[in-house]
Image (cartoon, rainbow, N blue to C red):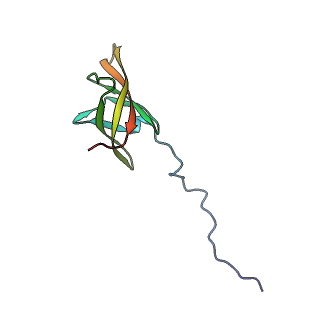
Amino acid sequence: MAEKRNTPPPDVDKPRTASRRLRADQYELKIRWDRARQVVDVSSSSVTFDFDTPLKVGSRFPVSLTAPGVAISTTIEVSHCRLTVDPETGRYFRVTGRFYPYVE
């Protein structure tokens, strides 16, 4: 006689949170004690954000990147810094940095 296994049916109504990617506006980035105005893009190797002060290209900065359920402390090396002037929000710098392992 065949064994009867008690396995519950899979829940199709539950949202799959592990496969959902966070939007850039859900992230918050801090360099030292200053917060970025806005995080524009986050990838596995870099981050792009708007900042009030210019950051020197080639410099490394410790950063803290947080989002719902995620907190990362690491180091970035600034690879691009561009002045942007917007009539509505004013003057800011669009910065792109590559992630590096945390340097103590």
Residue 18 at x, y = what percent?
A: 51, 52
Q: Is residue 103 left or right of residue 10?
A: left
The structure residue drawn at horizontal position 31% and vertical position 29%, both measured from the top left corner, is: 37
Q: Tell me the quarter of the image containing the N terminus.
A: bottom right
Q: Tell me the quarter of the image containing the C terminus.
A: top left
Q: Residue furthest right?
A: 1
The structure residue drawn at horizontal position 32% and vertical position 36%, both measured from the top left corner, is: 29
> Quadrant location of residue 41?
top left
Image: 46 above or below 71: above
Q: Is residue 60 left or right of residue 21?
A: left
Residue 90 at x, y = what percent?
A: 30, 16
Q: Is residue 81 left or right of residue 23?
A: left
Residue 32 at x, y = what percent?
A: 23, 36
Q: Nearer the viewer, residue 89 or 82?
A: 82
The structure residue drawn at horizontal position 61% and vertical position 57%, both measured from the top left corner, is: 12
Q: Nearer the viewer, residue 23 or 14?
A: 23
The structure residue drawn at horizontal position 38% and vertical position 47%, both measured from the top left corner, is: 68
Image: 54 above or below 7: above
Q: How many marks?
A: 0
Q: Residue furthest bottom?
A: 1
Residue 26 at x, y = what percent?
A: 40, 39
> Quadrant location of residue 5?
bottom right
> Quadrant location of residue 3?
bottom right
